[in-house]
Image: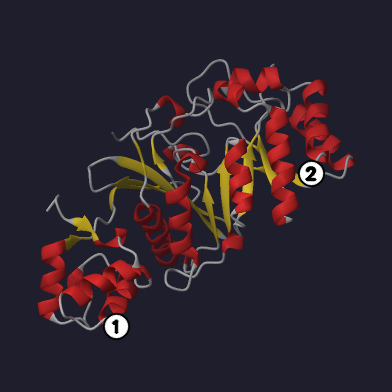
Amino acid sequence: MENKNDIRSLKLDELTSFFQKNNLPSYKAKQVYDWLWKKSSISFDNMTNISLETRDLLKNNFVINHIKIEKFQKSNDGTIKNAILLHDNLLVESVLIPTKTRTTACVSSQVGCSLDCEFCATSKMDRIRNLNPDEIYDQVVTINSQSLNYYGKPLSNIVFMGMGEPLLNYNNLIKGITKITNKEGLGISPRRITVSTSGISKMIKKMADDNVKFNLAISLHSAIEKTRNKIMPFTKNFPLDELNEAIKYWYSKTKKMVTYEYIVWNSINDDDEHINALVKFCKSSPSKVNLIEYNSVNSSFFVSASSRIISKYVNTLENNKIPVTIRKSRGKDIDAACGQLANKLK
């Protein structure tokens, strides 16, 4: 079994070539491809317009390494967290976040994380491997099904803010998003997808050059180099001036406003110097700010700033005509909130 290739790793022309070599009609390859991606089939037995003989041929040559839900948790606020078991028995987590107006899938891109953000539980895990395109796609299929089953509506949004740094799994990320967005797959509009990065400058430029259609969010948390390096040590290799240049380049190419994700902590970034630095950084390119509620990961160093300081951030940003929202955390009681995904099940 383990020596067989996952059939979803094949491109359509490769699958077509397999059918031709086995003296089967080429159009049957397209039918199988539709079962795999448009209909999200996880079994060859489901492919009812394919002959039993051909299905047996596929079973003898390929597998479908679909994900499985190892543990399902539902929060008091309706948030759903899935511990996802991969074909090699590794685990990742994904989340369904419902509100009155939308349902959002929070999707993982890596098993673990290779970055070292001090305030994030996932960063305490080793990065074991990148997720494959089909594993990214499967998370969306699973959460879309849960959205329909529990909330009576399909997914309205997808955010790559789960486990891992998406831009360090760029090729698989793009392939997964392609299957999610194109007509051969789920057909979800890329305008409803946001990729969140901690700020890998050269990859932001690559996305711009690749003319991607989805949205970009940056996990910023400080526009002062010294502070950012302290709370996100890896950023010493990605200084703010390079990040700023990359974001300007992104906007010049895509005309898409970037979103800055920003947590305010007591005695870390809760003063006028940090507020004014953020305003200056935002003004360099069209942007908006999401002020995110901090979710504790058992660190005494990080303590949420007071509501007075949060209000000061909001007022200062609004006075400078920078759009700002306060994002309340969901699913904290099941460790499903931003920064809390850590595979405690494992």
Q: Residue at x 54, y 51 (%)?
A: 159
Image spot of residue 323 (x, y percent): 79, 47
Q: What color scheme is it? A: secondary structure
Q: Residue 264 versus residue 229: which sits nearer the camera?
A: 229
Image spot of residue 340 (x, y percent): 47, 34
Q: Is residue 220 above or below residue 15?
A: above
Question: Helix, strand, or loop for circle 2?
Answer: loop
Within-10-Å neighbours for mark 2: few <14, some 14–19, many 20+: some
Residue that badge 1 annotates: 27
Left or right relative to 31: residue 1:
left
Question: Helix, strand, or loop for circle 1?
Answer: helix
Q: Residue 285: which disc?
A: 2
Within-10-Å neighbours for mark 1: few <14, some 14–19, many 20+: few
> Alpha-carbon distance for marks 1 and 2?
49 Å
Q: Residue at x 74, y 32 (%)?
A: 310
Q: Is residue 101 visible?
A: no
Q: Quadrant of residue 35?
A: bottom left
